[in-house]
Image (cartoon, rainbow, N blue to C red):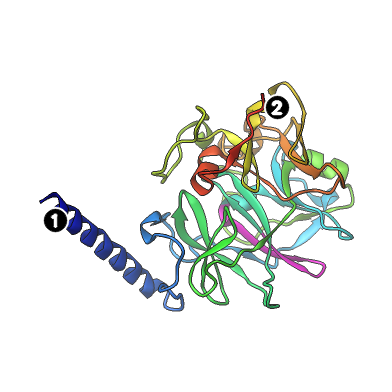
Amino acid sequence: MRFISILLLNLFLANAVYAQSGNWRYEWPNTDFSTTSVDFNEIMSGGPGKDGIPAIMNPEFYEVSQETKLGEREPVMTVELAGQTPRAYPVRYLMWHEIINDQIGAVPIAVTFCPLCNSGITFDRRLNDGGTLTMGVTGKLRNSDMVMYDHETESWWQQFTGVGIVGELTGVKLKKLPSWTESWGDFKARNPKAMVMRKPNYNRRYGSNPYAGYDTGRPFLYNGEDPPHGIHPLARVVVIGTRAWPLDRFKNTAVITEAGVRISWKAGTASALDSRNMSKGRDVGAIRVQDIKTGKDIAHDVSFAFAFHAFHPKGKWMLGS
């Protein structure tokens, strides 16, 4: 009897998954749902549909001296590629668009931010076969993290890992580029001749945080396990590959040197997910990661602990002594 009950439950779940992917086919007729690396039950709607959160294409920039709206402590995502003028992408724009497709020199990039995971990652949009992708927002979530898609094949991609999870490009991994979040004041002080993204031509409440108080609560649209070691799900951690350093370790030091990297913390950057006014969020500081031997910046992310645990359940927690 118990076996029959389990069998019926499995059949019900299988039919539910099939029905769900079947419904998606109406919205995504060009996506190959027969190819996937994940259980469709793990993917859920975040509310908006396809492109309901509009990614930015071809952003415009001006010199930092022309920017007058950003608060000194307000967070920006910084991209500094060798030989190119540094660029700042205000999180006030990423909060409402989540993806910015840009090109710096010969490198096409996607600057991405998932508010629910506090995950800010920059990707190289080029594929190994020479193709270039244009990234958009599906409106779907997996482990509370944004599921992206490419306009070329309409394959789905996990923002946290940069890996294709549904469609023709399943299993393909985008290259992560070094970028980091810091205060607008620190960026412009270090780069007085650099460029900052202009306000997009959309009717949005830029500078307002629609998730006020989120980073002191509980994860939204997440049904997975809490992190181990008593770490709060919404504690910030520095993610480098499959290792995570809790930001709590920087309470007594500004620099940690471990595992071949130098991780520096500097006070003065507001949390984008605390106060309704983004520039007035509590100070969570800024992180920069560099290779010990070369001094070069290393691709990393400062995300919530639950997201790291969800995508790297066997990852290493760098807890110190």
Q: Which residue is mark 1?
A: 4
Front tag of 1 and 2: 1
Residue lying at the far left of the rendered structure:
1
Q: Earlier in the sequence, mark 1 or mark 2?
A: 1
Location of residue 186 in the rendering, given as x and y in whole percent from the top left corner:
81, 39
Residue range in magenta is 96-110
Secondary structure of the residue carrying tag 1 is helix
Left-right relation of 157 to 178: left
In this view of the protein, which residue sits in the foreground, 260 or 163? 260
Residue drawn where x is 83% and y is 54% of the image: 86
**Does the segment drawn in magenta span residue 103?**
yes
Q: Is residue 242 magenta?
A: no
Residue type at mark 2 is: Phe
Q: Nearer the viewer, residue 79 or 223?
A: 223
Position of 69 with respect to 138 (left or right) is right
Element on which disc 2 rests: helix
Asked whether, in this view, residue 148 is left or right of residue 79, the answer is left
Q: Residue at x 80, y 48 (%)?
A: 297
Dot 2 corresponds to which residue? 250
Residue depicted at 55% across the width and 38% down the height: 305
Q: Which quarter of the picture shows residue 315?
A: top right
Where is the C terminus found, in terms of image quarters? top right
On the image, the x and y values in percent for residue 230 come to 50, 27
Would you say residue 210 is visible in this rendering? no
